[in-house]
Amino acid sequence: MNHSYEGSCHCGSIGWTYRTSTAPPQWPVRSCQCSFCRRHAARCTSDPAGSVEFSVASRDALHRYRFGLQTAEFLMCKRCGVYIGAYAEGPGGRFATLNLNALKTPVDGIPAATPTFYDSEDRDGRIRRREQRWTPVAKPV
Ligand SMILES: [Zn+2]
């Protein structure tokens, strides 16, 4: 059965609805150790069999931050500074990983995050990993 979970930035300008049939204790939770995610203490999850829809109440507030290989957009709120998740769009489709720190209400049973390192990936490898592991995004952000 599909359950849905809501996340948003602090001021509510941007957010997401995540649908997955996986129970929270089985969620993969990754704390990417790149210089961006480390600074946000990001804890991200995704489900290739799930779906996510982003909501943008205020276009002015959406900041699409890119760095490094420029293959994804890190969605942040310009008003309150919260990082809600990363989005990638390409020939393979639209995919996202979600920052669980942005959950509107705490969810019981989420596992501790596993530190992850992706420095050794090249551009194609990175895109391929996201297409296989991230959550399909219903509508363009
Ligand atoms: Zn905000």
Image (cartoon, grey):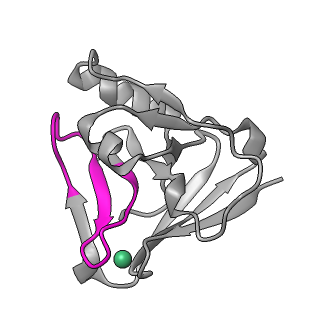
**Residue under the point 54% across and 54% down:** 100
Q: Is residue 47 above or below residue 85?
A: above
Residue that extends furthest to the top in the rendered view of this protein = 120
Q: Quadrant of residue 83?
A: bottom left
Q: Is residue 31 left or right of residue 141?
A: right
Q: Quadrant of residue 68?
A: top left
Q: Is residue 124 above or below residue 41?
A: above
x and y percentages locating residue 139 in the rendered image: 44, 64
Which residue is located at x 49 percent, y 39 percent? 134
Q: Where does the image place residue 29, in percent across and percent down from the top left?
A: 58, 38
Q: Is residue 81 left or right of residue 134?
A: left
Left or right? Give the position of 117 relative to 113.
left
**80 relative to 17, above or below:** below
State which quadrant residue 32 falls in.
top left
Q: Is residue 22 visible?
A: no
**Magenta span covers which residues?**
65-87
Q: Is residue 3 left or right of residue 74?
A: right
| Residue 134 lies within the magenta run | no
Q: Position of residue 117 (x, y in %)?
A: 37, 23
Q: Quadrant of the C terminus?
A: bottom left
Residue at the (30%, 64%) spot, across then down: 76
Q: Nearer the viewer, residue 51 or 109?
A: 109
Residue 52 in percent (x, y) is at 54, 58
